[in-house]
Amino acid sequence: MPQRNPTVRHPFRAAALALLVVIAATTSGCATFYVDSSLKDVPSADYAHPASPQPVQVLYSFQTKGVNNSRATDYTRKRVMETLSASGVFSQVTSDPVPSGAILSVTINNVPITDDAFAKGFVTGFTFGLVGSEAADGYVCTVEYQASLTAPKIAKHARHAIHVTMGAHGAPEGTAKAASLDEAVTIMTRQIVGNALKDLAADPAFAQ
């Protein structure tokens, strides 16, 4: 019977879907993680900065198939806040209300995008890594900004993915290797939030 990889007890690992089902089913534990290369990091200079940046209250939630996941939210919150702060789009990002009433809602929804990931993982496990397999988790980030309680909302979206391979399987095309799942999550979070925020800041309605 395949032995579960003890590393799946990590808070984020407990939250993931198809990606981590495969890891749990792998006997060798030699999973390799990759981040999709379709999105890149957004340097601060690439954001459209308001003439007078204002503070904003951030409401953040990580979801699993559209359902709030508190453990994953807590695990990724710091990464999200750091990305928002480093952008320079706002003078301050905080979890507390701000005088203007401005609110930035950020949601990352984790959705599995690989078919039969569970079965593929067991193929790898039972052959002790001689047969390789691959799975991937998709992520959709939504940022929604409201400058005041009476102002219209502006929403933008970005998509990303984390891939995992096991056994005798090469790197998925169009990906960059990460040292660990933790690093993959850090990169994915920074890039998906950064790109959604970049589109938001570039919207003429935001500048107004």
Image (cartoon, rainbow, N blue to C red):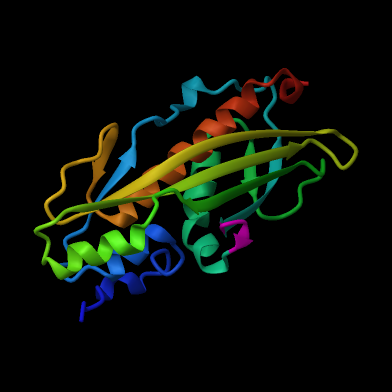
What secondary structure is the stretch in magenta mostly built from? Answer: strand
Give the side of residue 165 with respect to residue 110, left or right: left
Visible in this render: residue 88?
no
> Split into 4 quadrants, where in the image is the C terminus?
top right
Q: Is residue 174 above or below residue 66?
A: above
| Whole-percent x, y for residue 37 in the image | 34, 32
Q: Is residue 154 above or below residue 61?
A: above
> Split into 4 quadrants, where in the image is the N terminus?
bottom left
| Whole-percent x, y for residue 182 in the image | 33, 56
Q: Residue furthest bottom?
A: 1
| Whole-percent x, y for residue 200 in the image | 64, 28
User: Which residues fall within the magenta stretch?
Assistant: 64-68
Q: Is residue 189 above or below residue 159?
A: below
Visible in this render: residue 19?
yes
Q: Residue furthest right?
A: 150
Judge whether residue 162 is colored magenta. Answer: no
